[in-house]
Each structure stands twice: as C-alpha cells, then as structure tokens.
C-alpha cells in the first residue's frame, strides 16, 4: 500500500511532504487522551507540498464521508485483554486497529493496537497471543501521532507515510472523536484528483 501511495503521489505531481464498539459502545465525548506528546507536527516539511485543488480537503471531510459510525463509536479493548481477543475483535469487525483504554477507566485512552503490532510483536517473536496482554505490545498514548478534524488530508498523508503508520487517531479539544486509515486518506486524495481532472477537462472543452 505504501509503495502504491508513493507511485500515486509521483504521478499526480504531489510531493510527499504532505475502534469503539469492541462489543461495547462509548460516547466519544467522554474519552479524554491522557497526554498525547506527539500531536500534529508544526515543523515545516522538507519539500513544499503542491496542493492545487486538494488544499480544502480536511480530515473532517473524511469523517463525514465515513458516516455516523466514524464519529459515533469505534472498536476498543483494554490493556488487560489478551492479544488473541483483540485480534479476534479486529477480524470479526474487519478493522485493522483498536483503541486501547485502561481497565475500568473507559474515559482514559491508553494507546492503540494494530495488526502490525500483532505480526511484529507476537507472530515474528513466537509469543503466545493468548497469554500476552494488549498492554504489553500496544503503542502507548504518549507515542501516538494524531491529527485534528482541521488537519489537511495531504498533511495527514505525510504524517502517515513518514512514520510508516496506517491508522491515526483524530482528536479535538474534547478528546478522541474517531480514527482514519491510510485507505481513507488515499481514497480522499484520489477523489479530489478526479475532481481536479474533471475541472480541467471542463475548462479545456469550454472554449476559453
């Protein structure tokens, strides 16, 4: 997916610069990140992003496109759950990541667990998923990279490709409100690219 994304960026002349249902549903407004130490970076990218028609597309637009499920609830597990149960939940709901909360503290986000964590920290290392706790292999909240609803889609893409991550939590001043994947971001960029081509075709055929 990463390789395909880079090909798309080069062909489109866009420079690469730029879960809680578990079985239970939680009101996202109640979830408060403990202390995200790595929010959206404010540093200037090494190369300037040529946004063209993409500059108006934000994470909020993706959230709207995903429907009510994107900002109403998402899949989750606790730090004390086994990795086996977490992966089982991901498989049942066809998702690639779960938000992790602290036991008996559903308002406090502890981190995130993804398919990659399972492959790298369980399968490759020959550990047992049934005896390993989620808290032992998850990405802790102080290491999470996040975006806000106002983050530009190309900026989110840059963060995800630069850090080689496929899922990124979306937070606002009240806490976590959802999660987007690299697939969500790519679909948004492809859609905008098509619209830009349509606008150019309309301009050319308009006889101006």
Image (tube, helix red, strand yellow):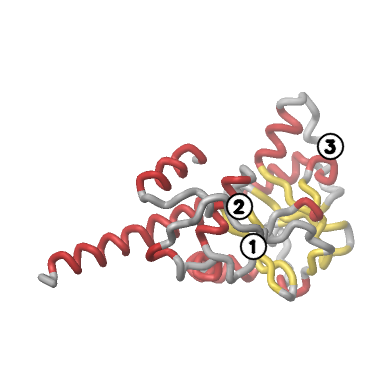
Asked whether the beta carbons under mark 3 and mark 2 sit within 8 Å of each other, the answer is no
Front residue of this view, candidates 22 and 110: 110
Q: Position of residue 64 (x, y in %)?
A: 51, 71
The disc at residue 132 is 3
Indicate which disc residue 159 carries: 2
Q: Which mark is residue 203?
A: none
Foreground: 23 or 156? 156
Q: Distance between the residues labelled 3 and 2?
A: 30 Å
Which quadrant would residue 27 be assigned to in this image? bottom right
Q: Residue furthest right?
A: 104
Q: How many residues crowd around disc 3 within 10 Å: few (fewer than 14), some, or many (20 or more)?
A: some
Of mark 2 and mark 1, the one earlier in the sequence is 1
Residue 144: x, y in percent?
74, 53
Q: Out of 170 and 17, give the one closest to the viewer.
A: 17
Q: Mark 1 points at which residue?
A: 147
Picture residue at 32% right of the left edge, 64% below the top: 195
Q: In which quarter of the image is residue 45?
A: bottom right
Within 10 angstroms of label 2, few (less than 14), some, or many (20 or more) residues?
many
């Amino acid at each position: 997916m990463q390789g395909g994304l880079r090909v798309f960026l080069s062909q489109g002349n866009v420079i690469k610069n730029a879960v809680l249902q578990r079985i239970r549903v939680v009101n996202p407004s109640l979830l408060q990140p403990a202390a995200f130490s790595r929010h959206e970076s404010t540093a200037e990218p090494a190369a300037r992003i040529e946004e063209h028609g993409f500059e108006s597309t934000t994470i909020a637009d993706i959230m709207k496109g995903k429907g009510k499920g994107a900002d109403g609830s998402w899949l989750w597990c606790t730090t004390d759950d086994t990795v086996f149960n977490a992966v089982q939940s991901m498989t049942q709901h066809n998702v690639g990541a779960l938000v992790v909360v602290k036991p008996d503290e559903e308002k406090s986000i502890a981190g995130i667990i993804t398919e990659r964590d399972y492959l790298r920290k369980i399968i490759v290392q020959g550990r047992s998923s049934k005896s390993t706790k989620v808290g032992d292999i998850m990405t802790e909240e102080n290491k999470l990279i996040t975006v806000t609803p106002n983050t530009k889609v190309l900026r989110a893409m840059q963060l995800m490709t630069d850090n080689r991550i496929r899922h990124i939590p979306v937070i606002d001043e009240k806490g976590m409100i959802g999660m987007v994947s690299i697939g969500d971001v790519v679909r948004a960029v492809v859609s905008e690219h098509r619209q830009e081509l349509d606008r150019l075709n309309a301009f050319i055929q308009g006889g101006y």
